[in-house]
Image (tube, rainbow, N blue to C red):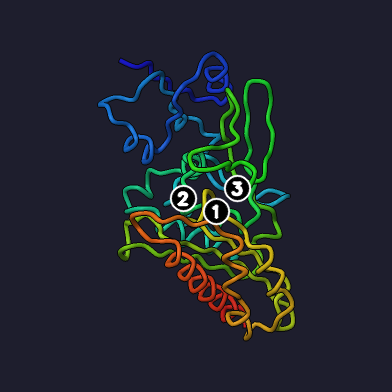
C-alpha cells in the first residue's frame, strides 16, 4: 500500500516534497485515468485539505485563484467581463462530475496541449505562484508551460495559485471550443479572446489558441493588427496567414493540420466578433 499524506498546512506539504518525490493529488480527474494500476504508485500527497490553496479572492493587484479551486467554483464565480472566457471554459471541462472535482492547478500541471483552461488564462495575462521549502516565485503562465506534459516546476515545488492582473478584468471576452461532438470531448481547436474598447475602437486585445501546438499560444501579430480598428471591422481583419504563422498543429486521430488551421481562423473570427458586439 502506498504512503498517503493529507496535510492541513502548506508548510507540511512543502516539507514532504523536500524529503522525497511524491505524487501530488487534488481532483485526480487527470491523475486516475493516466494510472494503469489499481493504486497510485509511490507516496501520494493529497493537497485538498490545505485551505490556503483554495478559493478566489480579489487583491490590490488583481485576482488570486487558489490551485485547488474547482472548475465548478470558477464557472459560478462573480467576476468581471474579462473573465467570461475562463468561466465559459470551466463549463466545457468534462461533465459536471469532472467540473466539481477537477482543479485549475491540476489542469495546468498536467500540461495537456488541449487543456481548456490555458487559452483564457493566457489571454488574461496570468501568472502562476510556485513554492518550495526554500522559498517562492512567480512565473508567467507562458513560461511555466514548457510542452506536452512538461512544466517549469522544479524539484520540491508546488503550484499554489494563479494570479490575474487587475487590468485583465476589463472588457468583453469569449471562449469557443471545437470537438468531434457537442460536449464531453477533447478539443480539436479552442480560442479565447478579450477586447477592451474606447470610442468605438479596439483599445486592447488579447487572443490565444489551444490544441494547435505543443502549448497554447498568444497571437501578438494578430492582436497588433486589430488594435485601433472600429468594432464593426474586427472579424474581417483577421488574416489566416498571420494565425497560421503563430501555430504548429499536428495531424492526429481528431483532425489534420489543414482542418485545424481553418477551424482556428474561423473560431477566432467568431470569438472576436462576439466580443465586438458585446462592446458596441
SS at badge 2: loop
- Report the residue marked by disc 2: 115
Mark nearer the viewer, 2 or 1 = 1
**256 and 232: which is toward the camera:** 256
Q: Are marks 3 and 1 in contact (CB under 8 Å)?
A: no
Tell me how far mark 2 sits from mark 3, CA to CA.
23 Å
First of labels 2, 1 by sequence position = 2
Dot 3: what SS? strand
Instruction: Name the residue furthest bottom.
Output: 232
Q: Label 2 vs label 1: CA separation?
A: 8 Å
Q: Give how far across and how far down residue 102 sits, in percent.
A: 40, 44
In the image, residue 224 lies at what x, y percent? 72, 69
| For residue 120, above or below residue 1 | below
Which residue matches tag 3? 57
Q: Nearer the viewer, mark 3 or mark 1?
A: 1
When asked about the image quadrant of residue 23, the answer is: top left
Residue at the (52%, 63%) spot, across then down: 85
Q: Nearer the N terminus, badge 3 or badge 1?
A: 3
Q: Is residue 16 above or below residue 232?
A: above
**Disc 1 on helix, strand or loop?**
loop
From this view, report whether residue 59 is shown above or below residue 138. below
- Of the pair 217 and 136, the residue shown nearer to us: 217
* Residue located 65% across and 43% down the image: 143
Q: Identify the mark nearer the N-term, 2 or 3.
A: 3
Q: Which residue is mark 1?
A: 216
Residue 80: % across, % down: 60, 63
State how many labels appear.
3
Mark 2–mark 1 contact, CB under 8 Å? yes
Amino acid at each position: 500500500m502506498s504512503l498517503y499524506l493529507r496535510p492541513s498546512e502548506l508548510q507540511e506539504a512543502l516539507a514532504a516534497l523536500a524529503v522525497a518525490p511524491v505524487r501530488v493529488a487534488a481532483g485526480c480527474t487527470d491523475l486516475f485515468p493516466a494510472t494503469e494500476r489499481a493504486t497510485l504508485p509511490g507516496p501520494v500527497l493529497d493537497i485538498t485539505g490545505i485551505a490556503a490553496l483554495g478559493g478566489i479572492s480579489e487583491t490590490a493587484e488583481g485576482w488570486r485563484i487558489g490551485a485547488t479551486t474547482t472548475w465548478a467554483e470558477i464557472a459560478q464565480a462573480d467576476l468581471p467581463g474579462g473573465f467570461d472566457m475562463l468561466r465559459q471554459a470551466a463549463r466545457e471541462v468534462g461533465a459536471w462530475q469532472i467540473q466539481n472535482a477537477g482543479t485549475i492547478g491540476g489542469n495546468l500541471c498536467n500540461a495537456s496541449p488541449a487543456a481548456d483552461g490555458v487559452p483564457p488564462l493566457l489571454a488574461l495575462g496570468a501568472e502562476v505562484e510556485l513554492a518550495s521549502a526554500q522559498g517562492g516565485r512567480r512565473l508567467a503562465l507562458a513560461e511555466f508551460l514548457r510542452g506536452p506534459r512538461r512544466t517549469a516546476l522544479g524539484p520540491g515545488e508546488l503550484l499554489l495559485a494563479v494570479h490575474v492582473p487587475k487590468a485583465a478584468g476589463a472588457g468583453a471576452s469569449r471562449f469557443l471550443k471545437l470537438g468531434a461532438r457537442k460536449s464531453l470531448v477533447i478539443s480539436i481547436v479552442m480560442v479565447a479572446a478579450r477586447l477592451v474598447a474606447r470610442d468605438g475602437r479596439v483599445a486592447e486585445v488579447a487572443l490565444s489558441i489551444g490544441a494547435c501546438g505543443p502549448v497554447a499560444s498568444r497571437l501578438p501579430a494578430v492582436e497588433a493588427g486589430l488594435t485601433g480598428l472600429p468594432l464593426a471591422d474586427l472579424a474581417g481583419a483577421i488574416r489566416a496567414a498571420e494565425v497560421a504563422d503563430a501555430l504548429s498543429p499536428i495531424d492526429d486521430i481528431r483532425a489534420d493540420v489543414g482542418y485545424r488551421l481553418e477551424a482556428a481562423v474561423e473560431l477566432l473570427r467568431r470569438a472576436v466578433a462576439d466580443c465586438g458586439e458585446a462592446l458596441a
